[in-house]
Image: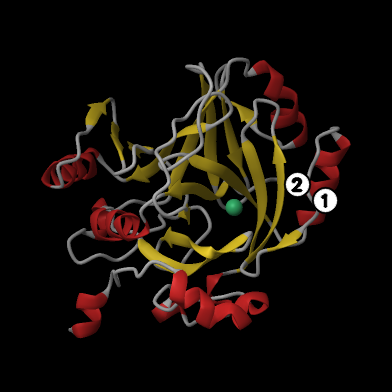
Amino acid sequence: MRLEGIHHVTCITGDAPGNVDFYTRVLGLRLVKKTVNQDDPTVYHLFYADEAGSAGGDITFFEYPGAARGRAGQGMVHTITWRVASEDALDFWADRLAGEGIATQRTGGRLRFDDLEGLGLELAVAATDDAPLVAEHPEIPAELALQGFDGVRAFSRDPERSRALLEETLGFAPDGDTAWEVRGEARGGLYAYDPAPGPGAPGAGTVHHVAWSSTMAEHEAWRDAVASARTRITGVIDRFWFRSLYFREPSGVLFEIATLGPGFDVDEPLESLGEALTLPPAFEHLRAQLEDVLTPLPDPRAARHAG
Ligand code: ZN
């Protein structure tokens, strides 16, 4: 039983319209689902990914309108890394981000920057045979585009506390003292710790949780495996587009194990993913009320629709 790398990374934004603009227009991802937070349906849950809405390249945001900025600290993910194909891609992104007034730092095949709310992001030239997960964007040639996640880095003051659960229960393969590779049949991803600067504060520009991919068939067995390691884990929660289990790993990072299906195209066609507000059936009766309170968002592909 193997986890198939990262499924999605979920973060917090205080500014949904600015968030849509940054992740679609600037970074070139596709808004693949515009829905509400299933634990608080008065706010958005926005999903950005490749053209097909694939697990492995899916960054999502809970909207808390006007939320103060947070700060990554102990037990929180502080950097999300996407793969790109080449140093040429890093040149392209350094220029493109500079044109948006975003400062970048380039070191050894990596380009680091923050999103508009201070979330730590990074592009890395990665040697991999994993399928590139690319979205279409009129200004970004496919060979320079983001290709899905390479990994996430978290803060921990004592990574050893997490080692047994990561290696013995979750099958993470060590890659140095404080880094691991999580690889299944089709895809892999990296998980690493850096020394914690101190306690963090959740808020805009911070990561809420990281989800790892499971096949549909093995999902229940992952619940049993984590529970057997004396770790508190939720029951299976049906998120409609996938099923989820949540638990905190010993360093404090909130983990989810999410299924590789049914997928974002179960309730809207692939060609128009993310354009309409989509509500899971249990929330459909609230639609009129929610459309009144949700912040209006730009349509990232409006120009293409007009053309
Ligand atoms: Zn999640």
Disc 1 packing (10 Å; few <14; some 14–19; many ≥20): few
- Kindly indicate the quadrant of the structure image that contains residue 242: bottom right
- Kindly indicate the quadrant of the structure image that contains residue 31: bottom left
Q: Residue tagged by mark 2?
A: 1
Q: Which quarter of the figure is the C terminus placed in?
A: bottom left
Q: Which of marks 1 and 2 is nearer the N terminus?
A: 2
- Colour logic: secondary structure
Position of 212 with respect to 146 (left or right) is right
Q: Are marks 1 and 2 in contact (CB under 8 Å)?
A: yes
Along the viewing direction, whichever of 95 and 114 lies nearer the viewer: 114
Name the spot of residue 28 as percent of width and height, x first: 28, 58
Helix, strand or loop at disc 1? Answer: helix
Rendered view: 46 above or below 264: above
Judge: label 1 CB < 8 Å from ligand 1: no
Q: Residue at x 53, y 27 (%)?
A: 192
Residue 129 appears in the figure: no
